[in-house]
Image: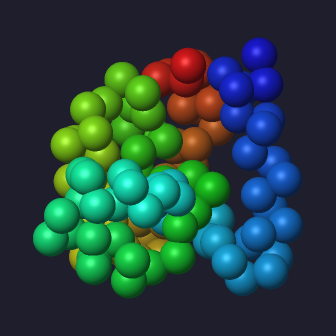
Amino acid sequence: WLRKTSIDELPQLINVLKGDMSMVGPRPVTRSELDQHYGIMAGRYLSIRPGITGPWQVGGRSDVSYERRVEMDSRYAQDNGILSDLLILLRTPMAVIACRGAR
């Protein structure tokens, strides 16, 4: 239930306050995920802070292939801005309520 409703993400607000994360951005990944999946896109991913919510959360989470996740993260890193962040923030509550892609 905690995972499906994303309540387990709330402690990450401390990381936002510390400046280690943003409210919106790609989700944090491990070094092995970065090496295995991101390839030449790793630099783009590393150019911005990870976020509590982001394109992957509102775009389907576990229902999305990892390849698609990399595409979403890369596009976000290249084209991020206040408007895209606001749209993601507005879409996040519905994604959480619908438990879309949560496993």
Is residue 27 placed above or below 1 in the rendered structure?
below
Residue 40: percent from the left, percent from the top?
Answer: 15, 70
Query: Where residue 60 sits: x, y (%)?
Result: 40, 31
- Residue 35 is left or right of residue 29, and the answer is left
Is residue 86 shown to the viewer in this render?
no
Is 70 situated above or below 94? below
Query: In which quadrant is the N terminus drawn?
Result: top right
- Out of 78 and 32, give the one closest to the viewer: 32
What x and y, as percent, mark residue 8?
78, 38
Q: Where does residue 97 sit, x and y in percent of width and height?
A: 65, 24
The chosen color scheme is: rainbow
Residue 36, above or below 44: above
The relative height of residue 43 versus residue 70 in the rendered view (above or below) is below
**Residue 3 in view, yes or no:** yes
Considering depth in this image, is 57 or 30 the residue closer to the camera?
30
Picture residue at 18% right of the left edge, 64% below the top: 39
| Residue depicted at x 47% and y 56% | 29
Which residue in the rendered view is the most extreme toward the left?
Answer: 40
Kindly identify the residue that appears in the image at 32 percent across and 65 percent down.
76
Residue placed at 46% from the left, 40% from the top?
58
Quadrant in which the C terminus is drawn: top right
Report the number of discs. Answer: 0
